Amino acid sequence: MRRLRKAHILKRPEWDEYFLKMAYLVAERSTCLRHHVGAVIVRNKRLLTTGYNGAASGVKDCRELGCLRDENNIPSGERHEICRAIHAEQNAIIQAGLHGIDISESSIYCTHSPCILCAKMIVNARIKTFITSGRYADKSFRKLFEEAGLRYKIIAPPQFTIKRLA
C-alpha cells in the first residue's frame, strides 16, 4: 500500500455535517411540491430513523393530485392542516414508533426548522437537540423549544461533494 502525503489526506466531515447531509439525501424522497424536507434522528452517533415530507402511505400525493395549499393561496408556514403531507420530523418519529425504536435523548437533523406541530411532537418524544441549516416560515417553535430546554442549533449548509481517494 502506498503512503499518502499529507496533502492527499481528505478531511472527514464533522458529525453534525455528516448527519445533516443524510437529512438532505432523505429529502430527495419527498413528494411535496413546495418543500423537500428530510430528517434523521440520531443518538450516540448512530442513525435511528429517517423521514421525509409526503402523503400518508398508500394514498395519492401532491405530485399526482396537485398542491391544496397552492390552489388555495396559503402562505408557507400557515394552516398546516390543509396539506396532504406528513412532515419529515413527524415521519421520522412515526417510523421510530412503528419499529420500536427509543428516540428519547436523541438529536434530530433536519433540512428546515420545524413548524409548531412538529416542535410539539419533538418535545414530547424527548428529543434533546434540533440541528438544521435551513429556515421554515413558521418561527413559533422557538419559544416552545426554549421552555422545554431543547437545544436548537443552526449550522452552515453542508458541502455536497463526494470525497474519495484516487
Image (cartoon, helix red, strand yellow):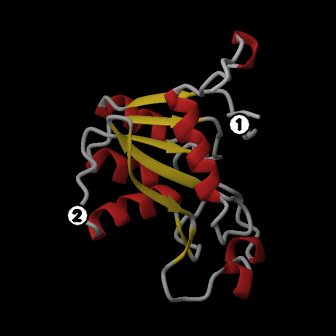
Image quarter of the N terminus:
top right
Q: Residue furthest toward the top?
A: 6
Let me know if residue 112 appears in the view.
no
The x, y position of residue 82, in whole percent, is: 58, 73
Relative height, residue 12 to residue 140 (above, below):
above
Residue at point 36% right, 65% down? 94
**What is the distance, in whole Å, between disc 1 and disc 2 at their CAs?**
36 Å
Residue 34 placement (x, y as % from top left): 73, 63
User: Which residue is at the far front?
Assistant: 1
Depicted 64 relative to depicted 77: above or below: below
Of the pair 99 and 1, the residue shown nearer to us: 1
Q: Tell me if 33 is positioned left or right of 92 in this view.
A: right
Look at label 1 and name its amino acid.
Arg
Count of numbered tags: 2
Residue 37 tag number: none
**Residue 100 disc label:** 2
Q: In this view of the protein, can residue 9 be seen by the observer? A: yes
Q: Residues within 10 Å of mark 1 (few under 14, many from 20)?
A: few
Ranked by sequence position, the earlier of labels 1 and 2 is 2
62 relative to 85 in the view: left or right: right
Q: Residue at x 64, y 21 (%)?
A: 11
Q: Which mark is residue 164?
A: 1
Give the class, few, some or many, for how many residues have Cα within 10 Å of label 2's Cα (few <14, many ≥20): few
Q: Which quadrant of the view contains residue 155?
A: top right
User: Residue 75 location, x and y as percent?
Assistant: 71, 59
Q: Amino acid at mark 2?
A: Gly
Secondary structure found at label 2: loop
